[in-house]
Every structure is written in structure tokens, then in C-alpha cells.
Image (cartoon, grey):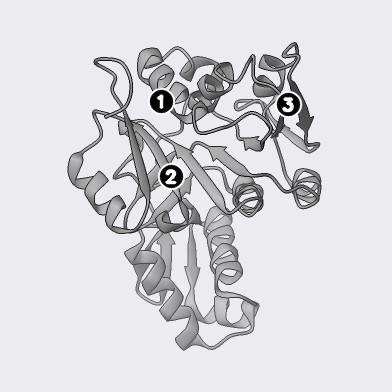
Amino acid sequence: MLKEERQLRILEELHDNRQVAVADLSRRLGVSEVTIRRDLREMDEQGRLRRAHGGAVAAAPALPEPPVVQRLARAEHCKECIGREAAALVADGESVFIGSGSTTAYVTRHLVGRKNLTVVTNALNVATELAAAEGVMVVVTGGMMRGSELSLVGHIAEQSLREVRVDKVIMGMQAISLEAGMTNDYLPEVMTDRTIIGMAPQLIVVADHTKFGKIASTYIAPVNRITTLVTDSETSPEILTDLKRLGIEVIVADVEGEGRL
């Protein structure tokens, strides 16, 4: 069992029981107690759980996000600026995956009118936005619908995503931390998100300033998996400097004026 799979199983146990014991995890996962303690120590440092005597307890859960249809109306100008900058990274003739979320919806609006563009998505609102766009071919995954996000997740979605390769992936993320990586608070979506990230070498993450320095309960991937980050000018300059040191291209949309900084 790979470390990431083992740690995902630990999080699943915590999700169900709120606490776990080293001895029980060692027996269930078929590894030594030393390995389990090492996993718990690493996951505690990442903010994914809290170590306790003889095991671990669930970390305090992040505040749940409201449904995507409500988030679309929040910080509209900020997301509009980010969406415009991210869409500029997509050229006519390319294939791109666009994930679910409110900021990615603004990216989508700037792709209407493109020529010979293929968009793969698991987001119903993204597909609807592009339904009448003559120059865009839309490919929608199957899967279980997550109603609050209007997204398709789970085994069927992951199977279909593995059959497709795109030039670029554009996705949002609930929480981004230099130490804890990219996280969200919906465990059933973890493997879907990881499958999406594996569709292309270029991962473009769109995230406004409210997403940084936060940790949700479920680990998705390390921050250095991002190739390009598109954010707004209210994001902490210190955070952006640290991201650039990791080799991430950072594009800052100027919400006060026009264009990028």
C-alpha cells in the first residue's frame, strides 16, 4: 500500500470514528506501528489530524463552503479578473479540463467565442455555459452528482477521466497552505480531484486571496504540483514570494485596475 493511499485510509477512519488508535491502524493496514506513528506525525504537521496518546483525533473541520450558486455572487469583480487572466492562458485549438467551483465558472465565461477548443469538465454549470458556444466542443464526465457544487464525482467520473488527456487543467481549490498543501472538506471527492490533476502536466489553479493559509480536512496534493497560480492583488506578497520560490508561475490579476501585475 502506498503512503498516500495509507494516509487516505487513516483519514477515512477518522471521518467515521473521529479518533483512531495506532495498534488498530497497524492491524487493519498491515504495516508496523512505527510506520503508523510516522504517518500520524507527518499528517499532524500538515494539519490533517491531531496526534493524541496512542493514536490521533480528527482535526477541527474547516467551515463548509456554501453552494456554488451562492458563491458565484461573492467577490464577483475579483473572480471576474482572475477568470479573465486564466482564460488568457488557453489558446484556440487546445484541449483543457475545467473543474467545478465559482472561480472556474468565471474562467469559462471568457472561453465563449474561442475557436476549435475542446473543454472537458465534470461541472454541470461549466457545460451549460458553453453549450451554445459554436467553436467549443464540450466533453462531460459521468459520475455521482454533488448537488451543492453541480459537479460529477466518484468512480464513474474517475474512470472516464483516465481515458482523456488534455493540454491544461484549470481548477479551483478550497484551501491552500504551503505546509499542508491543497485541501478540501469533502472526502468522496479526493480521488476525483487527484485523477483530474493527473490529466495534464500543466496545472493552473485559480484561487482568490481568501483561500490561502487555510487547511481543510482532506489532503489533495502538495502545493508544488501547481505549475501556474492565478490569484488577485489582495493575496499576501509573502505567500506569493514563497510560491515563486517553489518554481510556480504566479499571475496576479489587478482587481483595482485592468490587466495583470
| Mark 3: secondary structure | loop
Kind of residue indicated by mark 3: Asn
Q: Nearer the viewer, residue 178 or 32?
A: 178
Instruction: Tell which tag, 3 or 1, sits nearer the viewer.
Output: 3
Residue at the outermost left position: 238
| Tally of numbered discs | 3
Tell me if mark 2 has few (under 14), some (14-19) or many (20+) residues whose alpha carbon lies within 10 angstroms of its own.
many
Q: Nearer the viewer, residue 83 or 210?
A: 83
**Mark 2 and mark 3: Cα distance apart in space:** 23 Å
Let me know if residue 138 appears in the view.
yes
> Residue at point 45% right, 74% down?
39
Q: Dividing the picture into quarters, in which one does residue 17 lie?
A: bottom right
- Which numbered disc covers residue 116? 3
| Mark 1: secondary structure | helix
**Mark 3 and mark 1: Cα distance apart in space:** 23 Å
- Name the residue tied to disc 1: 82
Residue 129 locus on image (x, y percent): 66, 15
